[in-house]
Image: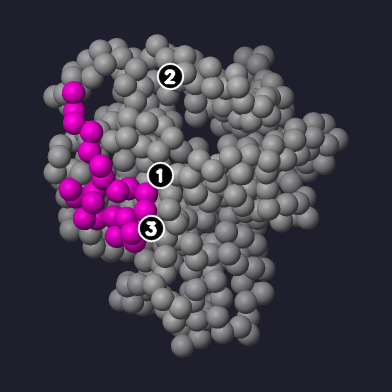
Amino acid sequence: MIETRDFDILSPGFHTNPFPTVDRMRAEGPVVCMKLPIVGRTYLAVTHEACAALLKDHESFARDPGNAGSRTQARILRFLPRTISLLALNMLGHDDPEHRRLRGLVDQAFQRRTIEAMKPMIAQIADRILDRMEGRLEVDLMSEFCRDLPLSVICAMLGLPEEDHDRFKNWLGGLKDTANIGAVIRAVPGVISVVRYLRRVSRPGGGALPDGLIAALRDAETDGQKLSEDELVSMIFLLFGAGQETTTHLISGGLFALLSHEDQRRRLQSELSLMPTCVEECLRYVSPVQMTKPRFATRDMVWQERQFRRGDMFAGFLAAANCDPAKFEDPHRFDITRHPNPHLSFGTGAHFCLGFQLARAEGAIALERIIARFPDMRLDNRTGNIEWRKRLGIRALAQLPVRLVA
């Protein structure tokens, strides 16, 4: 049994500078045990090797706790409103063969559009948002750019009317502190409103545009199987959340890293060909997704030279894996030329992030458009230090105040 340790991995102070804490975690060994808010005792894989091994081993570790002998999740879902419990029907909570079926249907819908073909639309949205900032001296990029761009892009991808975008912001605005059970409970009415709206709009004639992802998901079919209405709503909610929030924090965290490292920002401005490696370094250095969804041991076993029991809960702590000195040279350094850069920010294995190409494209276009429009942009520290939110598993800035001109 690994002794439970008390590492701070959710406070604003940790997110300001996670490197000292994750270095201490790795010094404990490849796996550390922590009692996490809400979810309880969890074994965190904290080295790059252990994290990758955990995510690739689908025989020893299951996403569905029912496949590891636990019925806790099923019992909890029975007590939740059906509108909320159906969100568990997306592919992230399943193992094969159910995961393969759902992933295949979503992949089919995604293949109808290429990211390359979407880039002009993403750039047009970015330019439209930046147009609103022209002539202003000070802006909070978090609320006015970093959040708006991914939100507008995923809504356009899904085929939702543009006039509904602000409603999504209001409905899901409470989900900014998932470490606080009170905040999660207060956000439930907004989530219920989103689910009801998605159920209506996803039906034929319900309002979704015919060339959007919702229509493609509704029509997708493999081996005579299609998504049920509940599965469709759950998948749309997953794509909306995954496509909006994580990319928001990639863009905001990447901008903050560039504005905090003047030499790297100047180099990127003079060599835009470095944008692909810059985005990869932002993914690694910022690690906007700090931790994976949980896995559950399917049997009693020895893993990473430690003994574990069936049903034990695990997660990959990406924030630690992405700065493991065994894998990255000088890992605390932000280097937009870093190559190779085998970060795990999109995960690995069967649950590798479906939207990785979209996230990369949005990140690159967002950075390119804003530094071209406002080349003299600087952080605005007049109100004190820029702060991060108290979050478990997500590294999120509370705000990103900048001065658009020197």
Q: Which residue is mark 2?
A: 65
Question: Looking at the rendering, which quadrant does residue 194 occupy?
Answer: top right
Which of the marked residues, 2 or 1, is nearer the chain's N terminus? 2
**Few, some or many residues within 10 Å of mark 2 (<14, 14–19, 20+):** many
Tell whether 139 sits left or right of 281: right
Q: Which residue is mark 3?
A: 12
How far across and down, in percent of the image, does residue 271 sit?
Answer: 38, 72
Q: Residue at x 74, y 46 (%)?
A: 160
Tell whether 314 sits left or right of 138: left
Q: Residue at x 72, y 28 (%)?
A: 219
Q: Secondary structure at mark 2?
A: helix
Q: How is the image coloured?
A: one colour
Against 359, residue 252 (above or below) is below
CA gap, disc 3 and disc 2:
31 Å
Q: Amino acid at mark 1?
A: Gly
Q: Amino acid at mark 3?
A: Pro
Q: Residue at x 55, y 46 (%)?
A: 183
Say the numbered circle drawn on residue 393.
1
Against 160, residue 281 (above or below) is below
Q: Residue at x 63, y 39 (%)?
A: 188
How far across and down, in percent of the image, does residue 7 sit?
Answer: 26, 45
In magenta, the rendered stretch is: 1-24
Q: Secondary structure at mark 1?
A: loop
